[in-house]
Amino acid sequence: MPFVNIKKQYLAIGMLVFVLLFLFNTRPAFQCQFNAEVSPYLPVIYGITPTYVRLAQKADLTRLSQTLMHVKNFHWVVIEDSLEKTKLVANLLKESNLKYTHLNIKTHKTKHSTPVPLMRIKGARGLLASGVEQRNLALDWLRGHLDKSENKAGVVYFMDDDNTYSLKVFDEMRKVKRVGVWPVGIVGGMRVEMPLVSDGKVSGYNAWWKPFRPFPIDMAGFAINATLFLEHPEAKFSRKVQSGFQESEILKYFTTKEELEPLADNCTKVYVWHTRTQKPSILNPKKLKRPIVPDDHIEV
Ligand SMILES: *[C@@H]1O[C@H](CO)[C@@H](O)[C@H](O)[C@H]1NC(C)=O
Ligand SMILES: *[C@@H]1O[C@H](CO)[C@@H](O)[C@H](O)[C@H]1NC(C)=O
């Protein structure tokens, strides 16, 4: 009989511990663990980011890479606009512990359009006629990579290196079947540029800048099912289109307005902002009256 009593006591204590553990295990933490372990299908997000040398480059890439460290199943494709890969970008990628592919291609000059990767035109946004070669190189890489991969499920997202991304935008794009769209904050002269949705379908767009574009959507406002790039080997960006038409140029291969999948609560939430890093003004050391200690050996 005493033996049985002891067992009951242990049982009671055990149950109490279990109940306490359950109560103190806060719900969000519990859910997070649950999602991470149980979700068997999480499409890879291929983030394609063209970048170029400038003073704020490391600052911008640091901020972006540290956002991306929080994104699961993410593969960062970074393409430098340069003849050779730079040590700065190579080291930053290596130290990030992200899964990445580092590529480079120099924007080539043509008779008709001078490449101006550094210049940003007033009233417009984004890099004028730039990023075309870089993004196309990334798409070539992607096709080769997917051809070899057993798991071809993935999503392609074109990411500027100085935008601001909420982690929520990555959750949204994993829902993409073909092409998903969502609003972009602070872009094109507007607080928010966004597809207009009625009955769960895109019925129009709220865009002030070049509203006659076939898809008046910023590069940060859509993601494409990666498999579609294998089905459309011809799909690429073009240098022949005017600024602001690159988005329409790539989207036309895959979708129509009617087929777009509105995400972010039927395009009512802003999870990405087209922020811009101001060009820093730095004094010319040669023109300073008071000499300063040379700092060329310091990577900034
Ligand atoms: C992506 O496209 C492929 C090919 O059309 C399709 O088989 C796959 O189901 C799509 N992915 C999703 C998540 O719908
Ligand atoms: C979007 O709108 C459709 C149609 O009104 C509705 O059925 C659907 O639940 C909405 N989706 C979200 C995420 O709110």
Image: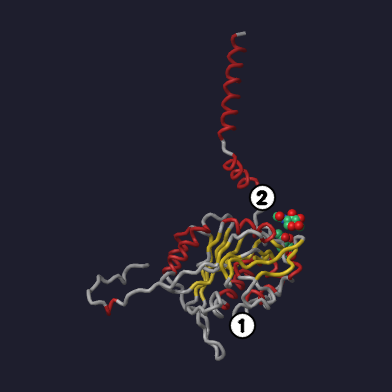
Q: Is residue 217 left or right of residue 85?
A: right
- Sooner in the amino-acid sequence: mark 2 or mark 1: 2
Q: Quadrant of ligand 2?
A: bottom right
- Residue name at image x 72 percent, y 71 percent: 254
- Residue name at image x 62 percent, y 8 percent: 1
Ligand 1 closer than 8 Å to label 2 CB? no
Q: Residue furthest left?
A: 290
Q: Quadrant of the C terminus?
A: bottom left
Identify residue type, mark 2: Pro
Task: Work out how far the residue at label 2 is from the one at label 1, CA to CA, in angstroms.
Answer: 43 Å
Measured as percent of width and height from the top left, residue 286 is found at: 27, 79
Q: Quadrant of residue 236?
A: bottom right
- Residue name at image x 44 percent, y 69 percent: 57
Measured as percent of width and height from the top left, residue 162 is found at: 50, 67
For disc 1, the marked residue is 242
Q: Quadrant of residue 179?
A: bottom right
- Residue name at image x 49 percent, y 61 percent: 65
Ligand 1 closer than 8 Å to label 1 CB? no
Compare residues 194 and 43 and report the one nearer the observer: 194
Q: Above or below — where is 277 with respect to 19? A: below
Colouring style: secondary structure
* Residue 68, numbered circle: none
Q: Residues within 10 Å of mark 1 (few under 14, many from 20)?
A: few
SS at mark 2 in the image: loop
Q: Residue furthest top?
A: 1
SS at mark 1 in the image: loop
Q: Above or below — where is 62 with respect to 22? A: below
For disc 2, the marked residue is 40
Q: Is residue 190 left or right of residue 291?
A: right
